[in-house]
Amino acid sequence: MMEKENLATKYNPKEFEDRIYNMWIEKNCFKAEIDYSKESYTIVLPPPNITGQLHMGHALDQTLQDILIRWKRMQGFGALWLPGTDHASIATEVKVVEKIQREEGKTKEEIGREEFLKRAWEWKEEYGSRITEQMRKLGSSCDWSRERFTMDEGCNKAVTELFIRLYEKGYIYRGNRLINWCPDCKTSLSDAEVDHEEKQGFFWHIKYPVKDSDEFVEIATTRPETMLGDTAVAVHPEDERYEHLVGKTLILPVVNRQIPIIADDYVEMDFGTGAVKITPAHDPNDFEVGSRHNLPSLNVMNDDATMNENAGKYRGMDRYECRKELVKDLEEEGYLVKKKEHSHNVGACYRCNTVVEPLLSDQWFVKMEELARPAIEVAKEKDLEFIPERFTKTYLRWLENIRDWCISRQLWWGHRIPAYYCDDCGEIIVTKEKVENCKKCHSSSVKQDEDVLDTWFSSALWPFSTLGWPEETEDLKYFYPTNVLVTAYDIIFFWVVRMVFSALELTGEVPFKHVFIHGLLRDSQGRKMSKSLGNGVDPLEIINEYGADALRFMLTTGTPNLINRVKSSGAWPLHAIKPEIC
C-alpha cells in the first residue's frame, strides 16, 4: 500500500524553483531551432555590465522580455531570446584598477598592459558568470547555448569590420577637436556619457579694457579660470552698443595678453552683457566660433584638471583653486565688477560623477550627419515604432541635433583601435591585420594606437553581431532582424539610436521593429536606485525569501507591498519601490 504524501503547510519556492529551472535547461526548453516552416521571433537581451550584480531594474527589464518570449514560444514561433554581457570599458577598468591598488598597492602602469588585461579577463570570468547565474535564479528563459560577450572573438571581429568600413567610407576620422574629458577617469566621453544637472553657481562680471582707450567691455562667466585661455571677445554684428569696437583690441585682465573683438551671430544681444568671452579650447560653442574666425586655441589645463604652463602663475593649481585665486586677483586689480548668483547646467561623468571639462584633444570621431539621416527616416515612416509612441520625439530630437561622435577612450580594457602609426614618416595605417612595417616608408618603427573604442561602438552592433555578422550565418538569416527591444527610457540616446544607424548602414534593415520602453524603478522618495545612494534592493534577497515568481509578479503589476514586508537585514535599507509609469 502506497504511503500518503502530505503537502507542506507553507509554500516554499526554494524547494522547487531551482529544480524546475534545471529541468527546463536539461530538456533544452529554451533552445531556439532554425525552422523555416515557422515564423521567427527574436529578442536580444540588453547586456548587463560585468561590474557587479543584477539590480531591480534588470529584474523588471528581463521579466518583461521573458513574458514576451514565452508567449511567442507557446504560440509556435521560432522564438529566440539571446543573452549576453557587456565589457563596460570605463566601469570595469575602474573596478579592476581599484582591486589592483587595494590588493597590491600598484597602478595599472606598474604592472603593464598585458598583465592588466589578464586581470580584467579574470574579472570578467568571475563577475560575468555571476550575473548569468543570477539571471537563471530569476527564471529567465534565454537560449544559453547562444550566450555572447561584447569582447568575444565574433563580436571583436564585427567591431573591427565596422571601424574599417566606416573609415574607408570617410565616416571615421582622427582630429584635434573639443571633447568631454573626465579628469578622474582620465578619458574622453561622448555627449551621451555626460549627465547634466542644474546647480547653483555664480556669474562673475569682469571688465576687459580696450587697448589705448578708457573704454572697457564687460563680460560675464561661470568659469573665470577659463579666461586664461581666451583668444577673443565676441559681440553680435547688429548690436549697436559694440559696433564701434568690432576689430579693436582688448587687454586680457591679469594676463595682459591682447585679444580681438569679433562679431558673430552666436552671441545673444539680450543675454548677459551681450559680450561673450571666446575660449576655443574649453567650450564647444566657442570652439565653433573660433573655427569660423580662425582663432588660436589655447589649452590652459592638464588632463587631471590642474592648470598647465599656459596658465602662467596659476600653473599647478587645481581648476577650482585657480578660480578662487584668479577672482581674488581680479578684485584686487579692479577688474571684477560683481558676482551674481546663477543656476546653470553642469556636466558630470556618468560613471564617477566628476565635473567634466571640455578639452581640446586628438581623438577618433564618427561623422554623424549622413549616418543619422536614414535613422530619422525610419522613425518618421513608422518602420521603427516606439511604445509608448511619445518616445519617438526623444529619439528624433537626439538624432536631429547630433554632433560627431568621439569614439576613442584612453583606456586599456576594450576593443583596441585598429590603427597604426609610423614614427618615421607619420603615416596612419588602418587595417584588420597587425602591422610590422610602414606601407609608405617601410620603417619598422610602427606602433598600434593605445586607445580603445567607446563601449557603445561595440554594443551598437549587438542585434546582429551576436547572430554572426559580418558572416552570413544561418542564425543571421533566420533570426534577423529582431522583433522587439525592451529597455528603459534613459538609454534611448546611449544605445537605441546607435543600434539603429549602425544596422541601417551595415545590414540595410532596422535592427528591430518595435522598441518597448518601460519606466525606472525608484525608491519611496522618487529617487533612481543606485549604489551611491544606498537605496537599492537586491532582487536575489527577494527571491530567496519569496521566490522568483512573486518578485516577477510584483514588478509587472507595479505592487510595492512585497518589498515593504521584507525585513531589513543590514545588507540594504528598507525602502518602498515605486515603478515608474511611462
Image: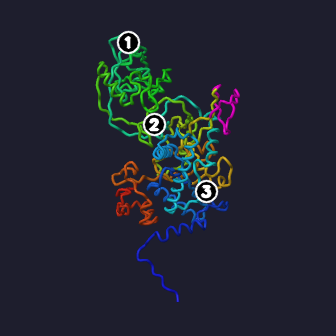
Inspect the image, locate mark 1, and give the three-letter code of the amino acid beneath it: Lys
Q: Residues within 10 Å of mark 2 (few under 14, many from 20)?
A: many
Q: CA distance from mark 1 to mark 2?
A: 37 Å
Closest to the observer: 440 or 96? 96
Is the residue 506 above or below the residue 365 in the image? Answer: below
Which residue position is annotated with label 1? 211
The numbered disc on residue 51 is none
Closest to the observer: 348 or 464? 348
Could you tell me if residue 207 is visible in this image?
Answer: yes
Which residue position is annotated with label 3? 146
Image colouring: rainbow
Inspect the image, locate mark 2, and give the three-letter code of the amino acid beneath it: Cys
Give left or right: position of 315 versus 329. Answer: right
- State whether the magenta stretch is mostly helix, strand or loop: loop
* Residue 246: percent from left, percent from top: 41, 16
Circle 3: element type: helix
